[in-house]
Amino acid sequence: MTPPARDAALAALITREDRATALLQAIQAGTIKPTDIPAAQVQALAHHKSVKLAALARTALRSVIPPSRAEVTATFQPSLTAAGDAARGHTIYQGRCFVCHRAGGEGMAVGPDLISVKSKGREALLTAILEPHKEVAPQYIAYDVATKDGNAYTGIVARDDATGLSLKIMGGAEVTLARATIRGSSSAGQSLMPEGLEAGLSASDMADLLTFIEMLK
Ligand code: HEC
């Protein structure tokens, strides 16, 4: 089938439980490759309202389901005890954290200054990095704001009053929007800090990053 036809066929298959089950069984049997199922449909199947179907999907599609936060946490356990190299951690901070966190006099002040968390302990730091949505103070919840002229901003609310809204966005800039220019705003109640910052890092890289934070002065 052509890709559009295949997507339509898949969509038709997964709207009904018996067909979705047949599809997943064909994947398990090796007739269809898990990589042929688009990410959105993988998500839909893995979170299907039928508990039985969802369980089958998690087995059949295991190789293409993004790792759960619990799995990621398990992967990075060795970084809790490994000795790290602060200089290498500094490079990782500059590549992945600088746009939102100050640390040792550099970086952008969107989230908290990392010096304020240096004594929290590795386990708490690691959880904060791997599971940013687990605990979020209200002032750090991300808002999406759309303006009437067609722009969209995501940031944390720095000021919100009758005249308008100020949003602090990644990179440290503050955007001020007059009330009359705003079309709408929404929030999923999640941290502005995204999940997945650990992508491509090894447990030893993470130990370097944690060491860098712990040694901040
Ligand atoms: C897009 C912006 C953004 C990026 C990028 C980002 N953070 Fe965050 N971070 C935040 C915000 C906002 C908070 C505060 C809300 C929360 O706790 O989730 C936060 C919270 C934290 C906390 C918890 C602080 C506390 O008070 O407990 C830690 C630790 C942390 N970040 C470390 C990092 C590290 C390390 C990186 C880079 C790998 C990083 N962050 C990248 C925005 C960001």
Image (cartoon, rainbow, N blue to C red):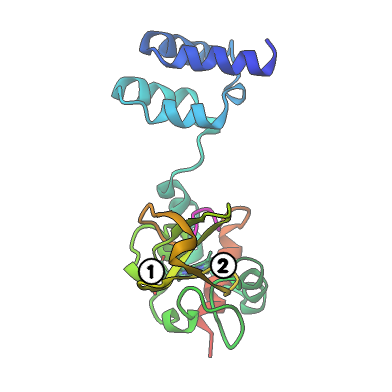
Q: Amino acid at mark 1?
A: Ala
Give the residue number, with chain letter if any, for mark 1: 124
Q: Secondary structure at mark 2?
A: loop
User: Does label 2 point to a residue whose CB lies under 8 Å from ligand 1?
Assistant: yes
Instruction: Give the answer, above or below, for where 160 lies relative to 196.
Output: below
User: Does label 1 point to a residue whose CB lies under 8 Å from ligand 1?
Assistant: yes
Return the x and y of residue 20 as percentages of the image width and height. 43, 14
Res 111 seen here: yes
Q: Amino acid at mark 2?
A: Met
Q: Which mark is in front, 2 or 1?
A: 2
Quadrant assignment for the N terminus: top right
Residue 108 picture quarter:
bottom right
Return the x and y of residue 53 as percentages of the image width and height. 36, 20
Q: Secondary structure at mark 1?
A: helix
Local crowd at mark 2 within 10 Å, few (<14), some, or many (≥20)?
many
**Labels in figure, total:** 2
**Relative to residue 25, is residue 207 drawn left or right?**
right
- Of mark 2 and mark 1, the one earlier in the sequence is 1
Q: Tell me the residue at 29%/25% (across/down).
A: 51
- Magenta stretch, residue numbers: 192-197
Among all residues in the image, which is located at the extreme right? 2
Taking the magenta stretch, the answer to whether it contains residue 143 is: no
Q: Which mark is residue 170?
A: 2
Q: How far apart are labels 2 and 1 at the CA level?
A: 23 Å
Among all residues in the image, which is located at the extreme bottom? 217
Q: Main secondary structure of the magenta part?
A: loop
